[in-house]
Amino acid sequence: MTFEKIPYKIYLSEQELPAAWYNVRADMKHKPAPLLNPGTGAPMGFEDLRGVFCDELIRQELDNDTAEIPIPREIRDFYKMYRPSPLVRAYCLEEKLQTPANIYYKFEGNNTSGSHKLNSAIAQAYYAKRQGLLGVTTETGAGQWGTALSMACAYLGLDCKVYMVKVSYEQKPFRREVMRTYGASVTPSPSMETEIGRKILQEHPGTTGSLGCAISEAVEAAAKNPGYRYVLGSVLNQVLLHQSVIGLETKAALDKYGVVPDIIIGCAGGGSNLGGLISPFMGEKLRGERDYRILAVEPASCPSLTRGKFAYDFCDTGMVCPLAKMYTLGSGFIPSANHAGGLRYHGMSPVLSQLYHDGLIEAVAVEQTKVFEAAELFARVEGILPAPESSHAIRAAMDEALKCKETGEKKTIVFGLTGTGYFDMTAYEKFHNGEMSDYIPTDEELQASFNKLPQVPGLD
């Protein structure tokens, strides 16, 4: 197809904004395993989770059967401020690579948070507000989720307490200030504010933190403050549900021009953007209607899918959260201080973990220097400075396009560009100065973490 037939950017109208989220679990033959009570090993139901999560979000978390869940009018109205987001044909990148492949990317960075995270932040804040809560607590890695949640809470008049992974808090002071501009309090994690934070600091003095540490602190803060609940920016079923708006828009845009992707690629940390991007395509695959090759791309420094264990584990370092069955490096694993802060999580979404375990998606781990090489090239030819997290998908998309160049195959590649990297210039500076290194955990380090996976009654 030529440029005249397919525009550089494909936009949907406001009227084409999805009216319902798609719940891929409804079409999964093997459902994600239930959350377990770490003390008893028993599956956790609605009442068990009410002390931590908002009521309606618990219902969404536990619903494995309803395929379409209507998006409330108030959330759709908020979405219209920045959605539908564009699907971009990467003509310039195709030309630069001299590949016969057609490359598309779904760009989620056209809002102030700079990422896809706002799609779930406004939903979770809305349900908290509707429940009559005073505020919410959360963690943030690179800062996109914290920024998005602070925006949503400011819009709805909720208090917002953010525990930010310490290395990102120090590397990205301006991201922190955006959150504060929207009224959020931001604390570097681990901190001395919580019992869990103090314990982690005692056991790991000088630690740069992790998402697992920050989750523990945020959960403790929610539990100890009446009128507050904890909300999470990735991993959970409810988050992937909200993010399905990405994939629904992507598919609608491709369908306008009769384009069927061969390969769909997304970066993977906890799994929110990848799960959202692939959802309607995976639905077709699960129903036997079409087949797609789906590729998850993770950092070699935190390789939960490619080197992790499929087992029940704590979602947090402090071991206060329910147990989830997922691909994990162990809740005590603290990744190196790499620059893709949003991918520094020890586990993967239970939904994506089950799909990966069933052989429905593939995974690859890449080193961060190769990621930043791809990011720099993309910025130069496509005019967008990508976030380090997104750049993992860019790296893999470029590699697949170069394979097409070698074989002469004309494949259609779609990847998720989850956000912009304008608050990540410290990382770009280290790359340009030759100060960036590629840390890859040893088998011995991972095994030491696996040896500490929880043993609870009835755990199989």
Image (cartoon, helix red, strand yellow):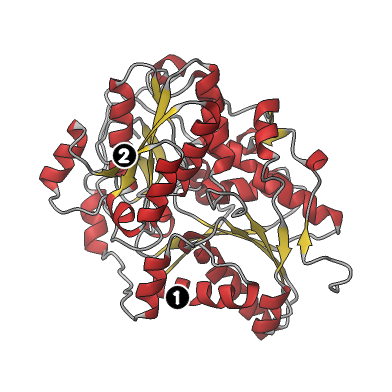
The disc at residue 370 is: 1
The one nearer the camera, 183 or 452, is 183
Residue 339 percent coordinates (x, y): 37, 63
Label 1: which secondary element: helix
Q: Name the residue furthest front.
A: 181
Q: Earlier in the sequence, mark 2 or mark 1?
A: 2
Quadrant for residue 430, please give it.
Answer: bottom left
Work out whether residue 358 can be spotted: no
Q: Residue 198: give x, y in percent of width and height.
A: 15, 38
Quadrant for the C terminus, please: top left
Q: Position of residue 59 (x, y in %)?
A: 54, 22
Residue drawn at point x = 22 percent, y = 59 percent: 445
**Does the residue at mark 2 contact the one at mark 1 (Cβ under 8 Å)?**
no
> Who's the residue at 72% across and 58% down the image?
87
Q: CA distance from mark 2 to mark 1?
A: 29 Å
Residue at x 60% of width, y 37% of height? 242
> In the rendered structure, which amino acid carries the disc numbered 2?
Asp
Residue where numbered disc 2 is placed: 316
Asked whether, in this view, residue 277 is left or right of residue 460, the answer is right
Decide which of 274, 210 is in the foreground and name it.
210
The residue sitting at 56% across, 51% down in the picture is 274
Above or below, 354 relative to 122: below
Q: Is residue 1 left or right of residue 236?
A: right
Q: Nearer the viewer, residue 82 or 346?
A: 82
Asked if residue 25 is positioned above or below residue 100 in the image, the reply reads: above
Residue 181 at x, y percent in the picture: 44, 42
Q: Quadrant of residue 104?
A: bottom right
**Mark 2 Cα shell of 10 Å, populated few (<14), some (14-19), many (≥20):** many
Q: Amino acid at mark 1?
A: Lys
| Residue 110 appears in the rendering | yes
Is residue 361 toward the left or the right of residue 161 in the image? right
